[in-house]
Image (tube, rainbow, N blue to C red):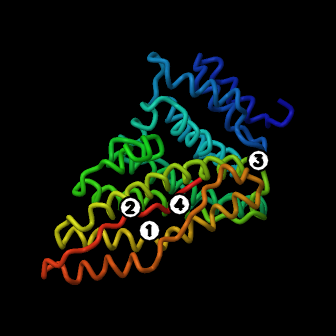
Amino acid sequence: MSGQTLTDRIAAAQYSVTGSAVARAVCKATTHEVMGPKKKHLDYLIQATNETNVNIPQMADTLFERATNSSWVVVFKALVTTHHLMVHGNERFIQYLASRNTLFNLSNFLDKSGSHGYDMSTFIRRYSRYLNEKAFSYRQMAFDFARVKKGADGVMRTMVPEKLLKSMPILQGQIDALLEFDVHPNELTNGVINAAFMLLFKDLIKLFACYNDGVINLLEKFFEMKKGQCKDALEIYKRFLTRMTRVSEFLKVAEQVGIDKGDIPDLTQAPSSLMETLEQHLNTLEGKKPGNKYALVVYSK
């Protein structure tokens, strides 16, 4: 406990007295030590989300309370712990977060205790926006894009066009919020932000696989859609192409900080002729001119 402050010890002791082992574990995961939350505390909390007698709202409230701390370290670790539980905990944890009207209100957070605090505060504001968006996305979809089945018989590949056209902008919004974390290798200077970056990287891989599945599905059905649907699908595809560049930039950072290349997908840009074909089909749709069917694969490992 040498790296913990007196405040950390008092907070943990208070929960020991009141008998809340879960709240005590949250405190221990979110100490002032400049390192990622310890695995043993995260594992305990993950297991707690699977216990029927554990009060999930109370667990979440303790995390939200820790996120109101003045220290960037405590707040950042509260966000990392929350993200970890959203990914690895029982689904009822993210279900509860999605049911709340408000989550993290950190848009004005600023730790003025030093230059490092100023720097990390920027990423805390961005990170909290992503976690809010992740929960909001779950509320709208009733599932987590990062957890659903991918591939030929996955959720996004088999979704009907009407639902797909509504789902893709939600997925795009979550990916945008993630990419706005916008960190450079020389800013990954401590264990806390590194832990956040790894969680974001793993989310992005899964989200982009879903995104790619959705685009393939749209393009395979493009020539069977009504004009209005074609317009929406083409706009989604255009946005997809612009996001590919930003995703590639994020993945470059991952490679530069030492993430195994085998874990980083290769993104292959579709030929420009495909866009021309789609636009031509949309322009001539009212004349009922036939189009050629294309399938697109842009995500591979």
Q: Secondary structure at mark 3?
A: helix
The reply to whether dot 1 and dot 2 touch (C-beta < 8 Å) is: yes
The reply to whether dot 2 and dot 3 touch (C-beta < 8 Å) is: no
The N terminus, quarter of image? top right
Which residue is nearer to you in this view: 82 or 183? Answer: 183
Report the Cα–Cα distance between label 4 and label 1. Answer: 27 Å
Furthest residue toward left: 287
Q: Secondary structure at mark 4?
A: loop
Report the Cα–Cα distance between label 3 and label 4. Answer: 23 Å
User: Closer to the observer: label 4 or label 2?
Assistant: 2
Q: Is residue 87 above or below residue 1?
A: below
Q: Amino acid at mark 1?
A: Phe
User: Closer to the observer: label 4 or label 1?
Assistant: 1
Mark with earlier residue (4, 2): 4
Q: Amino acid at mark 3?
A: Gly
Q: Tag 2: Cα neighbours inside 10 Å, few (<14), some, or many (≥20)?
A: many
Q: Which residue is mark 3?
A: 191
Which residue is nearer to you in this view: 181 or 203? Answer: 203
Mark with earlier residue (4, 1): 4
Which label is found at residue 107?
4
Residue at x-position 57% and y-position 27%: 46
Which label is found at residue 240?
1
Mark with earlier residue (3, 1): 3
Q: Secondary structure at mark 2?
A: helix
Q: Which residue is mark 2?
A: 215
Furthest residue toward right: 2
Mark with earlier residue (2, 3): 3
The reply to whether dot 3 and dot 1 touch (C-beta < 8 Å) is: no
Report the Cα–Cα distance between label 2 and label 3. Answer: 36 Å
Q: Amino acid at mark 2?
A: Val
